[in-house]
Image (cartoon, helix red, strand yellow):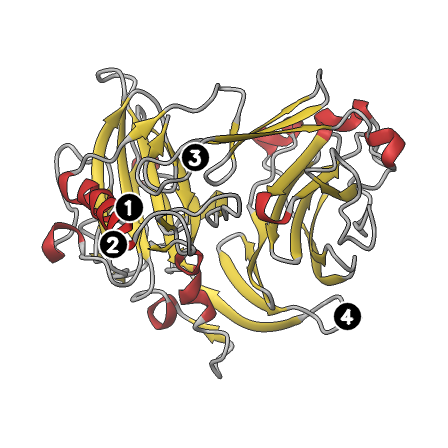
């Protein structure tokens, strides 16, 4: 956490509230609230619902528990979109979107269902009910390709002046734009293989995404590889490869697939003066891998890598282009391993430096076992320096060093020693992460 902006409460009150928040980590009593309704999706400390019938985008920010952020709702009327330059209202169900309250920005991407049409991406004003954002040079700034898939998907993220787009069709098109100028500053595309079992559903065998690291660097995740690019100079598009970061080598017969990845920076609160707020410089990248053995299902595992963005950016000024996990990740990341269990179902939510792992077991008592990790420099390591290892009630492992005795999925011993702290709790349902608590 960092101190909030000037104004509002006194320093003594801020320190008292921060101490109460820190005490929840010591006592294991992180407070939990409820999301507005199941219709709302988690958007990094906010809850968002695009109501197609009412042509409204509803954004809700729950009140904080300790930091002094009040509850607030924004209702954006999108009924005039066609008159303002598009898109047509009947296309809203096929839209992907991202919001930035501090910049009054709604990025709305329309994914056509016709194989011969192109996606559109709009920079709109939240307060203007879908008008073109006054700082945007163009209403529609996307310059992508035809998708060629009946059920395309898209991930959108906003970082300052940049918008990152990953559009999945027959090919995977990744691009980063300056939404204010409309200029593309990085792009790349690749073909991916379909798994025969999921071909009819249009699901890719591997995960490929781009994420914005900072104002000049983009991360590309492709299968089990991470590559960092520097965005192009003015007028360019391709950017420059900076470094190739290797994940821990897998053992013989193992393959990682069906990955998901997420970066959730904490939302800014320009409308109020919180006592304290999440430090965005501590934000982590979370990657989830389904690691399977070609012939032994019981040796499979669900692998979660929690990597501070600062760990990745620390490599961009080095001389070496290709780095092994030992050289870049062993001291700067955490690995969470869920051994294969037929009854377990797990999910991940993240915000800033905190990651919530929700694990449910339908064969056990109702409810969800939740572990909340805070992964960053400066925190006291869990259990006074010992590993979260081999607890009968803990359905996953968080070790400083994985060996063959712990899991066969790695080629050899693997270290991951970034400091972290952890709280375990029991909730009625899977959780989302808020600024200073949880939400079910």
Name the residue that disc number 4 marks: 236
Q: Earlier in the sequence, mark 4 or mark 1?
A: 4
Q: CA distance from mark 3 to mark 4?
A: 43 Å
411 relative position to 425: left or right: right
Q: CA distance from mark 4 to mark 2?
A: 40 Å
The answer to which quarter of the image holds residue 300 is top left
Disc 3 vs disc 4: which is toward the camera?
3
Name the residue that disc number 3 marks: 70
The answer to which quarter of the image holds residue 20 is top left
User: Pointers 2 and 1 in contact (CB under 8 A)?
Assistant: yes
160 relative position to 342: left or right: right
Name the residue that disc number 2 marks: 420
Mark 3, other Cα within 10 Å: few <14 / some 14–19 / many ≥20: some
189 relative position to 420: left or right: right
Name the secondary structure under disc 1: strand
Q: Is residue 177 above or below residue 168?
A: below
x, y percent for residue 118: 83, 41
x, y percent for residue 6: 42, 56
Front position in the image: 217 or 351: 351
Q: CA distance from mark 4 to mark 1?
A: 40 Å
Name the residue that disc number 1 marks: 373
403 relative position to 294: left or right: left
Q: CA distance from mark 2 to mark 3?
A: 29 Å
């Amino acid at each position: 956490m960092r101190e909030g902006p000037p104004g509002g409460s006194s320093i003594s009150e801020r320190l008292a509230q921060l101490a109460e928040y820190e005490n929840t980590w010591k006592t294991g009593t992180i407070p939990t609230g409820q999301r507005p309704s199941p219709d709302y999706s988690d958007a990094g400390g906010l809850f968002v619902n695009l109501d197609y019938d009412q042509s409204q985008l509803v954004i809700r920010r729950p009140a904080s528990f300790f930091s002094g952020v009040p509850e607030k709702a924004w209702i954006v009327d999108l009924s005039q979109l066609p008159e303002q330059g598009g898109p047509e209202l009947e296309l809203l169900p096929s839209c992907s979107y991202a919001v930035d309250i501090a910049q009054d920005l709604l990025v709305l991407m329309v994914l056509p269902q016709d194989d011969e049409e192109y996606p559109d991406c709009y920079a709109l004003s939240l307060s203007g009910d879908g008008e073109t954002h006054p700082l945007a040079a163009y209403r529609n700034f996307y310059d992508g390709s035809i998708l060629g898939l009946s059920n395309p998907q898209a991930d959108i993220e906003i970082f300052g002046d940049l918008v990152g787009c990953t559009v999945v069709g027959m090919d995977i098109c990744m691009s980063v734009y300056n939404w204010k100028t409309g200029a593309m500053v990085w792009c790349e595309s690749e073909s991916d293989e379909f798994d025969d079992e999921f071909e009819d559903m249009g699901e890719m065998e591997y995960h490929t995404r781009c994420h914005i690291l900072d104002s000049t660097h983009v991360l590309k995740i492709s299968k089990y590889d991470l590559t960092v690019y520097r965005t192009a100079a003015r007028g360019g598009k391709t950017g420059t490869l900076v470094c190739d970061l290797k994940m821990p080598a897998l053992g013989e017969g193992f393959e990682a697939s069906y990955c998901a990845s997420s970066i959730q920076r904490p939302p800014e609160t320009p409308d109020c003066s919180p006592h304290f707020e999440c430090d965005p410089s501590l934000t982590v990248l979370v990657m989830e891998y389904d690691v399977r053995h070609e012939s032994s299902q019981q040796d499979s595992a669900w692998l979660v890598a929690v990597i501070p963005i600062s760990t990745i950016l620390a490599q961009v000024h080095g001389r070496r282009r290709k780095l092994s996990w030992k050289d870049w990740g062993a001291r700067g990341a955490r690995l969470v391993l869920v051994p294969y269990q037929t009854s377990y179902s797990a999910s991940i939510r993240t915000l800033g430096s905190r990651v919530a792992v929700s694990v449910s077991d339908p064969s056990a008592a109702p409810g969800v076992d939740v572990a909340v990790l805070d992964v960053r420099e400066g925190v006291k390591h869990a259990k006074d320096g010992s590993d979260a290892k081999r607890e009968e009630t803990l359905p996953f492992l968080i070790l400083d060093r994985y060996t063959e005795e712990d899991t066969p999925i790695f080629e050899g011993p693997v270290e991951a020693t970034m400091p972290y702290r952890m709280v375990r709790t029991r909730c009625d349902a899977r959780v989302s992460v808020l600024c200073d608590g949880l939400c079910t």
